[in-house]
Amino acid sequence: MDKMHNVTDAFTMVHPVTLTRGVNAKVWDTNDRCYIDFVGGIGVLNFGHCHPHIVSAIINQTQSLIHYAYNAAAHTPYQTFMPRLCELIPINGELAGMLTNCGAEATENAIKVARLKTNRVGVIAFDGGFHGRTLAAVNLNGKVAPYKRGLGPLASCVYHIPFPSPDNEISDQQAIDALNRLFEVETDVNNIGAIIAEPVQGEGGFQLMSPSFAKYLRAFCDDHGILLIMDEIQSGYGRTGSPFAFPHLGIEPDMILLGKSIAGGLPLGAVVGKASVMNGLPKGSLGGTYSGNPVACAAANATIDIMQENEIWESADQYTQTIENTIAQWQEEGVSPWLYGLTGIGAMRGIELRHSEYGTHPSIMARVLNQAREQGLLLMPSGKHRHIIRLLPPLTIETETLQAGLDILKKVLSAIPDENPAV
């Protein structure tokens, strides 16, 4: 460990570089080397590094009010942002919500709300899901390593079922059977207060939930008085090429969780839901010292400004078409036997590295990450077997920068030998 930095060695760094600055889709390290950034702070920078409108809003806000705890006294950035956010979310009826420091805190508060409103403690989550690293949220995650290993007993009454998707081998019926088995073997359905799911899994490999299963789930929740929570922390705020991902499923949730790109790079999250769910809770049961900080709210207001411009959605459409056409062309050219195809939907796409004969292998992703970085491209892995590249460049990425990044990736993929890495 480098003791000069005094940072715990519990972190795992995907890329051993130290960054000093960034502009839109490019970053520079301490040696002033430039990289094309397809990581975007793991989904935080859908509108790029240091977007001028967001930077201006931050600077202006710091000159008037840097902080006030909303529990102590209201402030205008919070009061301006929340109505705009609720208006943006396509859920029918009156909405209400609260701001948090991050996505994990949004998850924690949503579970609190579900318990308070239903008087039930059980929660159903999905294999492969990711909802945060805090102690209650971590048990919702759909895998043990590295999030739950060594923690001992976690929050009880959390149950997992398979995640059905056109991007994996899990069918609707398998998930429905697992749900039915849960209530035959594990718990009474009347113990379940909420079901939480990502409409498109992030850590799980950019896999879209089966829309037909989502409709089944919505009806199931309605029949049994269960709240349906959609975790849009990574899939929201334009990542799929539309403001939110859940409309792709043809349903409306009771609550939606937000974070990551909501404030253009500043720490902020949100829980928004139907007013009948979010109101009528015990006074003082929700809140937080920094939750809804004025500077973060100012950045979030600027982010909504950007989302209301047609230009951003035209750019997202162009990005989507480029990715889909490029990967299809690479497959037609036979660029690499490890290029299996795309996962996800719209502008939220993953590139699956799977050989038709040898399957998946962690050494392949490690090779791609390292060689791409050496050539000036930063990538991020995902998926159960760490075999899916999740593409997270800003939706504002310049055409020439996107093409340059894809050219590097093509070169790296074409250099992977067609042999069994396990031998």
Image (spheres, rainbow, N blue to C red):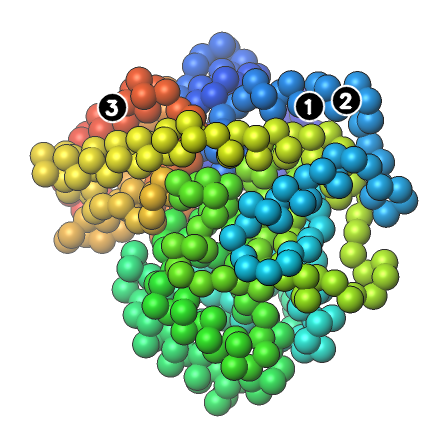
Most extreme residue toward the left, as rendered? 333
Q: Are marks 1 and 2 in contact (CB under 8 Å)?
A: yes
Most extreme residue toward the right, as rendered? 72
Compared with residue 60, is residue 142 higher up or lower down, i.e. above or below? below
Q: Which residue is mark 3?
A: 407
Residue at horizontal 50 percent and vertical 11 percent from the top: 31
Q: Which residue is mark 2?
A: 62
Q: CA distance from mark 1 to mark 3?
A: 35 Å
Residue at horizontal 55 percent and vertical 67 percent from the top: 228
Residue 335 can be seen in this image: yes
- Across and down, in percent, residue 274 comes to 63, 62
**Crowd tier of the residue under label 2, counting other residues whose Cα lies within 10 Å: few below 14, some 14–19, many 20 or above:** few
Dot 1 lies on which element?
helix
Q: CA distance from mark 1 to mark 2?
A: 6 Å
Q: Which residue is mark 1?
A: 58
From the viewer's perspective, is the residue at label 1 or at label 3 nearer?
1
